[in-house]
Amino acid sequence: MDKSSPSTNDKLPVAHLSAENIPQEYQFEAWRQGASPVFEVSPLKDPKTYACSSTSYKLDQLTVHHTVFDAMQFSRTPQLISGGWSDCITLQFYCSGQMQGALADGTPLVMGSDRISIQDFAHAYSGIGGTRSVGQFGMIIPRHLINAHDKIYTHYPMFSWPVNSPPGRLLTHALSALWQALPEASMMDGPVLASGLVGLLNGLLSHQWDEATHQEMKRATLAAMQGYLNANLHRAELGVESLCQAFYCSRATVYRLFQPLGGVSTYIRDQRLTRCHQELQRCSEATMQTRKAIARRWGFSHWVTFRRHFKQRYGVLPSEVETVLISAHNGRSLESTSYSAEVERVRTWLDSY
């Protein structure tokens, strides 16, 4: 045997949750159980037709993964955080699709293929991962390995670099090169590769804070505007002009702040759809009249328009939310399946942070 090539037993630990070894009707449940230490998830379509594929490597103290999944709702709940489940910092890059939502304090949470993002999982958040298939590279890092973790926690729980910026290009290239190397890497390579990636990230972060201070001021203004909009979603006339009057600013300022979120109208519509979806989830037996009342309460005066936007965002009609929710909550047992060990391996890795 070539001594320069690691044996199978010497290679990095890996877990595959893929279409090749998991029937589609079980794929959402496998993903839900594996990810349970990090967040709660709900599908935006029938779980039995849900598609998800994930490969994860244990790289010394890090977990590196690539996941492709259908649209779903994520929630990092206060209960998970207070229970000490997976207190970590993540580096994420969406190679396709996007995820958008907000931290509990209203800070916007937008991740897409144009940015590489850092997120502190000590903060509660919720969001929607795309309306179609999403592809994501990620790295989960123990908090203590990040030199400025206290500053991230206090001031910048969510920030990102454009992928076409020097730091963004360096990080995305490094992640890509790392991913290509992992299948042939040995256990002895693990600490070296992990140390190199974390060292690169710490170096970039050390020069980030001057720019981040400026960005923090913009985020604070945007968060205040979002709070105003969220408190007034029932008002039919809500829009750009409302913000200009409430915050004594120009339309150009409002446009600039909301541009990463797709604009003010898109933000308002998405927030209204979110409230409607949440209410429909809480309705055990919603009638057509109930659904129309919920839509009107959150600012949708035209049922056909609401129905179309709801379908575009969630992949199901308002009348189908209950069916999807019941099916998701009646998750199928994975015990004694050939891939249950893979699910448990991922769950154990995430639970270790």
Image (spheres, rainbow, N blue to C red):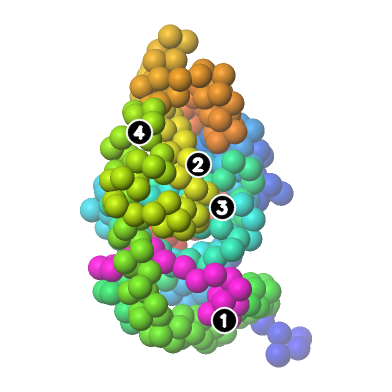
Q: Split into 4 quadrants, where in the image is the C terminus?
A: bottom left
First-in-chain label (2 vs 4): 4
User: What label does residue 60 carry, if any?
Assistant: none
183 relative position to 121: left or right: right
Query: Disc 3 on helix, strand or loop?
Result: strand
Query: Disc 2 on helix, strand or loop?
Result: helix
Percent of width and height locating residue 48: 60, 31
- The amino acid pointed to by label 1 is Pro
Query: Quick check: marks 3 and 4 in contact, CB under 8 Å?
Result: no
For the record, the magenta segment spans 153-170
Q: Nearer the viewer, residue 199 or 259?
A: 259
Query: Disc 1 on helix, strand or loop?
Result: helix
* Quarter-of-image position of residue 308: top right
* Mark pair 3, 4: CA separation: 24 Å
* Mark pair 2, 4: CA separation: 12 Å
* Quarter-of-image position of residue 157: bottom left
Near mark 1 (Cα within 10 A), the count class, few <14, some 14-19 or many ≥20, is: few
First-in-chain label (3 vs 1): 3
- The amino acid pointed to by label 2 is Thr
First-in-chain label (3 vs 4): 3
Q: Can residue 34 be seen in the rendering of this structure?
A: no
Residue with the mark numbered 1 = 166
Percent of width and height locating residue 314: 54, 34
Query: Disc 4 on helix, strand or loop?
Result: loop
Residue with the mark numbered 3 = 98
